[in-house]
Image (tube, rainbow, N blue to C red):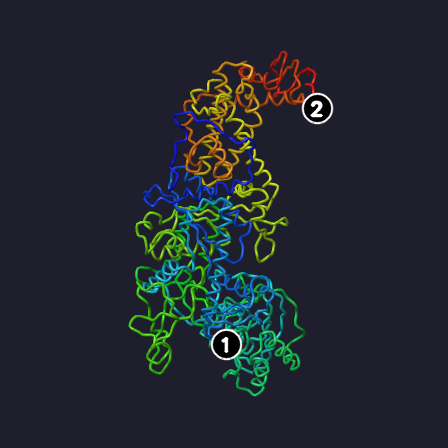
Amino acid sequence: MAISRIAPLPSETPTASAPDRVSADGLEQKWGEVWREAGTYSFDAKAERDDIFSIDTPPPTVSGSLHVGHVFSYTHTDVLARFRRMRGQTVFYPMGWDDNGLPTERRVQNYFGVRCDPSLPYEPDFVPPHEGGEGKSIKAADQKPISRKNFIELCQRLTAEDEQQFENLWRHLGLSVDWNLHYQTIGNRARKVAQAAFLKNLERGEAYQAAAPGLWDVTFQTAVAQAELEAREYPGHYHALAFHGKDGDVVIETTRPELLPACVALIAHPDDERYQHLFGTTVTSPGFEVEVPVLAHPAAEMDKGAGIAMCCTFGDLTDVQWWRELSLPMRSVLRKDGRLLSEVPEWITSEAGRKLYEECAAKTTFSARKAIVEHLAESGEMIGDPKPTQRMTNFFEKGDKPLEIVTSRQWYIRNGGREFTAAGKSADLRDALIARGEELKFHPDFMRVRYENWVRGLNTDWLVSRQRFFGVSLPLWYRINEAGEVDYNQVLTPTLDMLPVDPTVDVPPSFTEEQRDVPGGFTAEVDIMDTWATSSLTPQIAGGWLEDDELFAKVFPMSVRPQGQDIIRTWLFSTVVRSELEFDSLPWEHATISGWILDPDRKKMSKSKGNVVTPMGLLEKHGSDAVRYWAASARLGTDAAFDEAQMKVGRRLAIKLLNASKFALTMDADGHRVLLDPALVTVDVDRAVLARLREVIAHATEAFEAFDHTRALEETEAFFWNFTDDYLELVKERAYNREGKYSAEEADSARAALAIVVNTVVRLLAPFLPYSAEEVWSWYREGSVHLAQWPSVDELSTIEGDASLLAAAAGALTALRKIKSEAKVSPKTPILSATLEVPEQLVSQLELVRADLINSAVVTGPLEFQSAEVEAIQMAASELGEPPAKRK
């Protein structure tokens, strides 16, 4: 049962019962268990739509371990969730695991020493050859081939283990997630949502298949989408090759001589005077002796190399553009495994050309390049030696080799990259998606331009099919005609009530298993969906689309999507696309974008660079509150350095909150009453501290509402340190009132002010330091501070005080302390007399705190405030007494 919400100011006077020795150690386990058993963060499904704050929590990729960058960004989200909960909203805060796709497959291959071979039969009692560390050293060629089903079972086994470790870490960090609201992107619910959304896209014409040239990773044997590209420098050589024309040779420069047998044209800019006389003529390729035309196209670069380039099908994306726009023939020689075709292509007809190709057949691009370059050097058709160069080329973001372009049949979803017309949608999808970006509230706002630039720069639709194994199946089959040929134009689909389906196991409506892969029957689509095709539906998956209509209506569109800046073009954009196509709306109102964590060399931390820090050790070393403090000290969208020194500051703050709170709450010797009634605050300086606190409440609340958690922390922390260093020291003698120097009213005024400050600050710091705040709260209150109401200025509306008095008192106290610190004597050493020079306007203020200053600073003689033309309070004259005798 969830803890009930409680009012921040009870009518009764509570009493405090703090431990003899307070400590920040062990609070994670203590309060983690309490929160779990009490259901402190459980979502109330009965809440009204207007009262719900829903979070589209990023599902971390389950591929080994979390790193400190995850702690950084997920803390930002949790701080926001805790604030919203204390503001009275019902927080829908789920957690998902992104456990399908290539990262999981790679981890399974390395962990167990296996690889998937779909042609192999299933082994029910299969035992992998390796576990853990041993598998990491096994070369890919030595990995044991196993069936697809066996491979998927190993994926599921390993991700289940990883997910439990992730949950343990998140709980230790103190994420206020409702763990009843968790999902897996490979789970049945996610598979159903992803497949249903795809089928709806297909029905409306937004999903389509096409056999076309596309980017291909030869290592992972899969197509790659535009959003997954990463441009990197790659070493190569320029080769000057002579094509033979009627009026002489035409020299081109290329870094890909191995694609010479795929050459279909030479291309130059239409304004390039050097080649205008050649347009419309033909030349013969060196070595292979294939006749190709010389053509003009504005995409040719006159100032690059020789200014004329060979177009091959396909060397790069420009080749694809030329091939389409100039209606050139298809002469592909590259296979999906990165090797050249085994047979001599039909367009190479000369004996010399066919002989040269035979030397390259079935070789890798590297070996084929070597054979061709040696031949052309010997024939004199390569001019000079190859010249070293560094060229920018496309890589799959998770790959190690440059991408190739091969022709294959793939599935796409419209995303504005190309114009189209379909039922209910027009060709202005790109404009609609740009408009959605303008409508979405980005925090910080400057991140919006990254979204807009990506949408405007799209040049292709979203390729969603992958030639992998562990993922959500494309829910499709194809008819096989009577001749035994697969007819990809006759697509068979399941009904929605059949979902989720595995086409390799399940059968389409009106068919039987006996008709699988036989003439007149059907065959399964074996490709899976891109992992983003599932992750783009996280609001629908978490929100219960197709399963719980009432819940989905309450939480969708969601309130906020928190995420990293590097996946705006993938996760954020793709989610907007799916929501636009299905619901004609944004998926959320706000998007909060975290910055990156930088290592000591100011480089982004990432697993691929090997410079990450795993977080559990940090949490155990410094405490979760301390690590959260470091994370929350960084603003959204701002990169932050990994800094353990900042964590030490956070730990000091957490410990100070515990110690100062115990001190302030147990001043009353008669039962440790916690006086929370502002009417008891009658002394001017006590009213001043509450007036300043009222300003802090207003500023912190305003900052949180503006998604600026860092400013809220800064405001609160600065006030808290001033409170402990100055105000608490100033009034503690009056609050104790051991010798009866003050009236009961004056003592209660200090005690009430101290208690009200603690009662407020512990709530202001609760989103940042949840464990320490909960510990303090438990000393004098029932229930959880995280279900208490966020502080309001209305709580202190009856207080009329001058906040500047607090600063004046602090300045005077600092000057009096300085006398002793410079003399290097004990703080208990009496001051026999002192004269302070103060700005004229502060003299009357300091008279209001004279008694507290005298008792706090141990002034036994006259204390004078002398008006002077000074900017700050300073000592004019003083006399010290004898230091107190040391105890024996």
- Give the farthest residue toward the bottom: 351
Q: Which residue is mark 1?
A: 332
Q: Is residue 270 visible?
A: no
The amino acid pointed to by label 1 is: Ser
Task: Establish if 760 lies above or below 631.
Answer: above
Kindly identify the residue that appears in the image at 54 percent across and 50 percent down. Answer: 69
Q: Position of residue 720 (x, y in %)?
A: 53, 30
Regarding mark 2 in the picture, which secondary structure is present there? loop
Which comes before the other along the chain, label 1 or label 2?
1
Q: Which residue is mark 2?
A: 824
Q: Would you call the spot at circle 1 few (<14 residues within 10 Å), some (14-19), or many (20 or more)?
A: many
Q: Are marks 1 and 2 in contact (CB under 8 Å)?
A: no
Regarding mark 1 in the picture, which secondary structure is present there? loop
Q: Is residue 814 visible?
A: yes
In the rendered image, which quarter contains the N terminus? top left
Q: Nearer the viewer, residue 64 or 404?
A: 64
